[in-house]
Amino acid sequence: MAVEFDHVSRQFDGVTALDNVSFSVPDDSIVGVVGTSGAGKSTLLRTVNGLETPTGGTVTTLGVEPATLGAGELRGLRREVGMIFQQYNLLGSKTVAENVAMPLTLEGTRDARRVNDALELVGLGDKADAKPQELSGGQRQRVGIARALVTRPRLLLCDEPTSALDPMTTGQILDLLTQINEQLGITVLIIT
């Protein structure tokens, strides 16, 4: 299993965000978590890569429990777990290629080929030198996807990646995530 949630709970100052959640995400699958705003979906997703710690139960990600890892081990796990955010979180002063390269830069790696490969995969090979403000919303989300893929993760977490997009672009992004799953064998956990 790529991810296992075993009776996971999370409380914030007496407010229950997650209450006894249990399910598994098989390797090489696409699993969606659907719920209303404020239902705890993002909190659940953030327990997978250790951005949140459960107050009860356990989360196992790629065979380890993020809540039990030290800082160095957690960084190692996060290299194997890519994350696509609802807001693109792109740096306006950087080019598309520089935004995609950011995870590699942070780990001290420079690999232009991986950046180019990621941009080609998402259909933006010709936009490497553009700035984010020159792109449509769908293209910006593709840059975010390329940035998540550049580290060659085994698991891709998607935090409402289509919520700010029109229906046609939403379909294109979901098709792209399906293609990534099928071609690269990356497990996809998406919340919406």
Image (cartoon, rainbow, N blue to C red):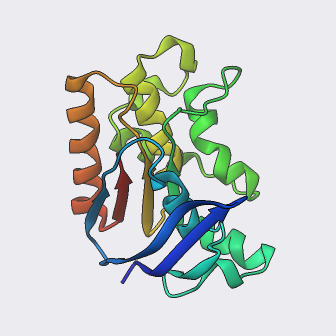
Q: Is residue 51 visible?
A: no
Q: Quarter holding the N terminus?
A: bottom left
Q: Nearer the viewer, residue 124 or 92?
A: 92
Q: On the picture, is 96 further left or further right than 158?
A: right
Q: Is residue 35 above or below residue 167?
A: below
Residue 14 x/y as whole percent: 68, 61
Front residue (pair 83, 94): 83
Eyeballing the image, is 41 above or below 160? below
* Furthest-right residue in this view: 71
Q: Where residue 150 sits in the image (x, y, percent)? A: 52, 52
**Where on the picture, by quarter, is residue 77?**
bottom right
Q: Is residue 187 visible?
A: yes
Tell which residue pokes out farthest to the front in this image. 14
Residue 48: percent from left, percent from top: 53, 68
Q: Quadrant of residue 124?
A: top left
Residue at left offset 26%, top offset 62%: 30
Total labels: the figure holds 0
Residue drawn at (43%, 66%), measured in percent from left and top?
155
- Measured as percent of width and height from the top left, residue 122 is found at 35, 39
In front of the other: 18 or 91: 18
- Relative to residue 35, is residue 54 drawn left or right? right
Residue at horizontal 58 percent and vertical 45 percent from the top: 112
- In the rendered image, which quarter contains the C terminus? top left
Residue 55 falls left or right of residue 28: right
Residue lying at 71% horizontally and 20% vertically, measured from the top left: 93
Q: Residue furthest bottom?
A: 63
Decide which of 56, 183 is in the foreground and name it.
56
